[in-house]
Image: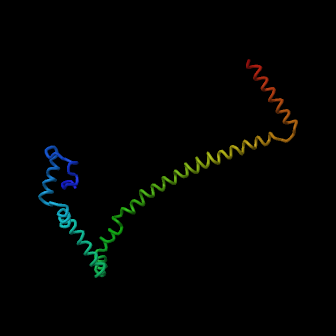
Amino acid sequence: MLYGSFFKGVIFVDSAAHPAMHELTHHWHTMFHSAAGMALHGLMTLPFVLAASGVGLAWFFYMKRPDIPAKIQTKFALINQVLENKYGFDSFNERVFAAGSRFVGNKLWQIGDVSIIDGAMVNGTANMIGRLSGVVRKLQTGLIYHYAFAMIIGVFFMLSFYTFKF
């Protein structure tokens, strides 16, 4: 796309200001000449050859001769054990990081949720309303002369407040 006619007239890179682009242009024109040449070059590189060889070898071992991997596993049992245990990193992460996270989460749950939210806020409010209603319940006797006495006391305090205020 960069060296063909796709971006012709849209992208222009000054070779003097950007020597890396000059080297890339030179490499493109001398080695690949086209996108197909670049793809063909990619198929001949060592990483691709090694990956294709690994796929072929795995197919041979597990499809044609499944007895070979079993023999290799028994012969190299120590290496196999280390690799199966993932060098011990999973068990280390489980014992240190995961267990530590569970410990911190459990403490935050006990302190934040159980003690503060459930204990103080939710149940604390309910307990406070229960105590307040116990006091108010004792004030409501159902006898009219108690209510009349409370109104007289209320009027007395209001008159005293307004009298001494002015």
Q: How many marks on residues?
A: 0
Q: Residue at x 72, y 41 (%)?
A: 132
Relative to the observer, which residue lies in front, 5 or 58?
5
Residue 144, placed above or below residue 66: above
The image quadrant that residue 153 belongs to is: top right
Residue 74, placed above or below residue 158: below
Q: Is 96 on the left-hand or right-hand side of 12?
A: right
In the rendered image, the quadrant that contains the C terminus is: top right
Q: Residue at x 36, y 67 (%)?
A: 85
Relative to the observer, which residue lies in front, 134 or 140?
140
In the current view of this chain or complex, which residue is farthest to the top? Answer: 166
Relative to the observer, which residue lies in front, 36 or 159?
36
Residue 78, placed above or below residue 133: below
Q: Is 147 on the left-hand or right-hand side of 15?
A: right
In the current view of this chain or complex, which residue is farthest to the left? Answer: 30
Can you give x and y, in whole percent of width and height, for residue 77 in the image? 31, 74
Residue 124, placed above or below residue 61: above
